[in-house]
Image (cartoon, grey):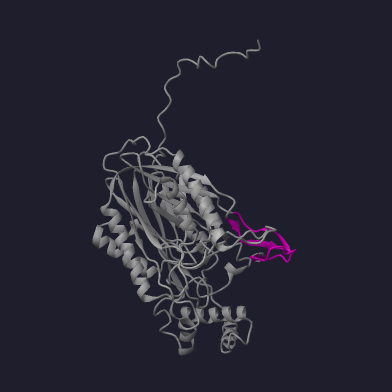
Amino acid sequence: MAAQTPPKLQAGQKVGFAERDITPSIGMEMPGGYGKAYHRSFHDPCKVRAVVFDDGVRRVALVGVDALIVPRAMVTAARKAIFERCGIPQEAVLIGASHSHSAGPVGMVQPGEYDHASPSVKRLAYEMSSCADPGYLLRVETEIVRAVADADERRAEAACGFGLGREDRVGFNRRLRMKNGLTWSHPGKGNPDIIGYAGPIDPDVGVIGVWDRHGRLAGCVVHYACHTTTNPGGISANWVYYLEQTIQGVFGKDVPVVFLLGDCGDITQVDNLSPYANPPGEQWAQNVGGRVGAEAVKVLLSVWPGSFAPVAAQVVVERMKRRIPSPGRVKRSLAIVERSPKEVDPTEWTFAKEIVLLDALIAKERDVEVEVQAVQVGPAVFIARPGEMFVEHGLELKKESNFPMTFPVELANGCVGYVPTEEALGPGGGGYETRLTSYSNLVPEAGRRMTELGLMLARRMQPGVVPTPPKAPPFKAPWSYGNVPPELS
């Protein structure tokens, strides 16, 4: 697309983008489940995508990673290296996972995580569970650092536009209220016991566009809330690939697209109330990514570039408690996992294994480090938390925030598993996301506390102004062609 009218630039304001490849190798583990699965084919590249905003006083970095999660240890190490190399403060670097279920081996079990446990528990963790690859983790960490450093070096004068689109036909709440009084996840299409959706969605497509001094789109940041589980076949960034392809199809193949995931712990592409069969993965990925990308294009064509000052960042870290399985449940689970998965119900065995693993984690650590971060880019604030946050948490942040645009980011700067609402963990709740596992185990009030902390950080910041076009000139006279009564003869 041809360049727009060159924007009015503000002295000292610069932006830089960069990408690095993190495509895993064929044969590596494919994370996302509770057992081992392996990549057997390639579909599209996985990337680290980074942008650095510099308002002339401070710098912040937003990093989107085509990965299931970003482990806390990797984030901490990458931030330290970025500070040493670029001088960007560690609290000013947001690193978020896209949650692609078709990307590289960054989870679930981390290297050495169960080295303290018994031989039988080690076997369950390292031989019977999805495991991160130490070499791949180091590679991703290295490329995050390089991407931010490259983006920092490529900073150039730029103006930013901020906008919101709406896409409400590709994401659906996967939790449904049932006639038995509980809430189930994916209860099955056509299930006569379904009453209706148990929660909302977040249809906002958040966009920050960056234009260079010549009026060309230099890159963009896109924010949307939907699981990246379309799995088009093989190694893939998932539907984010088609988001990128759609935007680049309009503005040029070299336009960087940094994607950050909104709160979607209970949102996927599956419509459990649809009477129709789910489409194949490739078609599904194109539909979600294409529609979100098309909405982002519409926003980019309509926003007005201008100042993105100020930029700022703040972080708070707290320890949050785990839910503890009862001794009786641990004992029953140990008895189940002593048998072969082929001898018992596979689901029962899987979640018995998870209770045993959780019990081993609790022996080492009864609570978990949780970081909440707020990163400001002018009139927009990104509030990052490390869990798969239920959409209600993000909607609450948007409702109560003091910013014109608030972008909740989940699975950022670490991973603590699903973070349901207190209602979901109450008497009428339930469903997959509320299961007690080594992955998801925070106490019911954890999500509310993260929301409180995020709002606290945002309220310490002074929002910038959304750039707007120049005001219309003072009225002088109506259009002489149009200021007439109807002519009938």
x, y percentage for residue 321? 48, 70
> How many marks can you see?
0
The vertical placement of 73 against 151, above or below, is: below
x, y percentage for residue 439? 50, 72
In the image, farthest residue toward the top: 489
**Which of these two is toward me, 256 or 326?**
256
The residue stretch that appears in magenta: 171-200
Can you tell which quarter of the image residue 83 is in? bottom left
Which residue is rendered at x = 28% and y = 64% of the image?
81
**Which of these two is toward me, 287 or 138?**
287
- Quarter of the image that includes the C terminus: top right
Look at the image and tell me whether residue 310 can be seen: yes
x, y percentage for residue 62? 37, 55
Can you tell which quarter of the image residue 96 is in? bottom left
Query: On the rendered structure, is 415 left or right of 155?
Result: right
The vertical placement of 129 against 483, above or below, is: below
Can you tell which quarter of the image residue 340 is in? bottom right
x, y percentage for residue 23? 39, 67
Whether the magenta-drawn stretch holds residue 278 is answered as: no
- Quarter of the image that includes the N terminus: top left
Look at the image and tell me whether residue 396 can be seen: no
Whether the magenta-drawn stretch holds residue 177 is answered as: yes
